[in-house]
């Protein structure tokens, strides 16, 4: 009998140690909307339901924005007497399950937030010590996506904490995407692939193009400062395991040109596309950026290769991204505050992806399809020459 008991325990421990994330949930980078960038903790059920409505009526759902993610501040300040998280009754008077059901009724999926620490970043109850209990509640609420932050984690091992929560989600039995919002502090790209579907690679983004925004004890980063970090991490990204350079700031205060460049870069980097604006009030220009099907197709390309910075000279950057069926994407980006002249000879410039082993064919005349104008603009038979304005971008899909 003792031998049988030990065998059962050993089998259980083996199962726990080898448990992995749910597979097949993110063959391409997740797309959706998150409440934090605009609303922070100022959230409630009316806002979430209205946002669900607009995700559908605006065409964003049809464009691929599937996940509606409720970020920090949804819960009451204390757990109940049984240790369960409780939705804030003022913000969610009908409970969270009713909101989740409403979002699901729109054909969308619902995302939730918590934190690996004892408290969330906004000082609400964190999950440390309650991993399996919280996971069971998320499953009971029919949650589809968990964003798991890294505040108030002094003395906690990141790999252990995220692996424990991954096990808890698996044990709860409901398939959901697990987003490791660890900020890149403990190099989650080196251990995160079996644990979750995506991992943050930097501190938070801010709605500026090329600087930092000080929060006193830490700095939020701009679009370009985040892009600087991603290129060295591209080998770790691919179908089911994505580098996450943080949510989109499109529509949150940058210029139209900067928003378009931001969106283009995130697509080139095969980044998760999580809108962070108030879509109830977005302008037609913002909507046009967020729903550009040709740019989204580059981000969502099934080959799943993160693009790379091919060159960077005098603030003129050139990025390339291999795509399925032998196509490529290319961006010419002017990072500077003055006009930049581009001269690129396709036939005399070897473009090779040494990590994923793709090469631009110099004996093929690719068609230059401009994904922002929707027009063909010549072929690679002739050199490409243009002038790009400050912070602007020219983005082509090279079609064979």
Image (cartoon, rainbow, N blue to C red):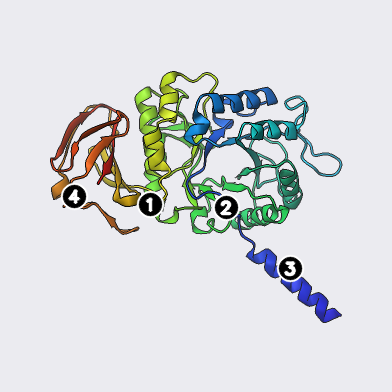
Q: Residue 325 location in percent, x, y?
A: 32, 51
Query: Which comes before the other along the chain, label 4 or label 3?
Result: 3
Label 3 crowd bin: few (<14), some (14–19), many (20+), radius 10 Å: few
Q: Which residue is mark 3?
A: 12
Q: Nearer the viewer, mark 4 or mark 2?
A: 4
Secondary element under disc 1, as helix, strand or loop, is helix
Check contact, mark 4 vs mark 2: CB within 8 A: no
Q: Residue 121 bears which disc, if any?
A: none
Answer with left or right where residue 305 lies relative to residue 49.
left
Q: Nearer the viewer, mark 4 or mark 3?
A: 4
Check contact, mark 4 vs mark 3: CB within 8 A: no
- Gap in angstroms between the C-alphas marked 4 and 3: 56 Å
Q: Quadrant of residue 2?
A: bottom right
- Gap in angstroms between the C-alphas marked 2 and 1: 20 Å
- Gap in angstroms between the C-alphas marked 1 and 3: 39 Å
**Residue at (74% x, 73% y) in the render:** 10
- Gap in angstroms between the C-alphas marked 4 and 2: 39 Å
Q: Which residue is mark 4?
A: 364
- Gap in angstroms between the C-alphas marked 4 and 1: 29 Å
Q: Residue 232 bears which disc, if any?
A: 1
Q: Nearer the viewer, mark 1 or mark 3?
A: 3
Q: Which residue is mark 2?
A: 196
**Residue at (63% x, 65% y) in the render:** 18
């Amino acid at each position: 009998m003792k031998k049988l008991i030990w065998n059962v325990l050993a089998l259980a421990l083996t199962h726990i140690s080898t448990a992995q994330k749910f597979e097949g949930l993110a063959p391409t980078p997740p797309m959706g909307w998150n409440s934090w960038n605009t609303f922070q903790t100022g959230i409630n059920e009316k806002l979430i339901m209205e946002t669900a409505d607009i995700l559908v009526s605006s065409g964003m759902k049809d464009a691929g924005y599937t996940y509606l993610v409720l970020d920090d501040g949804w819960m009451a300040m204390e757990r109940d007497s049984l240790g369960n998280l409780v939705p804030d009754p003022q913000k969610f008077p009908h409970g969270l399950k009713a909101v989740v059901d409403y979002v699901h009724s729109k054909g969308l999926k619902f995302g939730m937030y918590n934190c690996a620490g004892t408290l969330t970043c906004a000082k609400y109850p964190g999950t440390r010590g309650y991993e399996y209990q919280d996971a069971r509640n998320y499953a009971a609420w029919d949650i589809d996506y968990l964003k798991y932050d890294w505040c108030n984690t002094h003395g906690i091992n990141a790999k252990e904490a995220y692996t424990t929560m991954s096990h808890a989600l698996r044990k709860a039995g409901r398939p959901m995407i697990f987003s490791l919002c660890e900020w890149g502090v403990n190099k989650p790209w080196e251990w995160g692939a079996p644990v979750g579907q995506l991992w943050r690679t930097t501190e938070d983004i801010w709605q500026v193009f090329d600087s930092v925004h000080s929060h006193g004890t830490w700095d939020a980063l701009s679009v370009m400062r985040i892009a600087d970090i991603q290129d060295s991490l591209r080998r770790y990204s691919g179908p089911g395991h994505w580098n996450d350079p943080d949510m989109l700031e499109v529509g949150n205060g940058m210029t139209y040109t900067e928003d378009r460049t931001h969106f283009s870069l995130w697509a080139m980097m095969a980044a998760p596309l999580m809108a962070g604006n108030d879509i109830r009030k977005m302008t037609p220009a913002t909507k046009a950026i967020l729903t550009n099907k040709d740019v989204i197709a580059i981000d969502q390309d099934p080959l799943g290769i993160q693009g790379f910075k091919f060159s960077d000279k005098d603030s003129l950057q050139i990025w390339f991204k291999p795509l399925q069926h032998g196509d490529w994407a290319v961006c010419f980006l002017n990072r500077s505050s003055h006009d930049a002249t581009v001269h690129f000879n396709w036939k005399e410039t070897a473009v090779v992806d040494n990590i994923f082993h793709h090469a631009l064919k110099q004996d093929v005349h690719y068609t230059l399809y401009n994904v922002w104008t929707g027009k063909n603009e010549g072929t690679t038979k002739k050199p490409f020459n243009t002038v790009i304005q400050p912070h602007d971008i020219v983005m082509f899909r090279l079609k064979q």
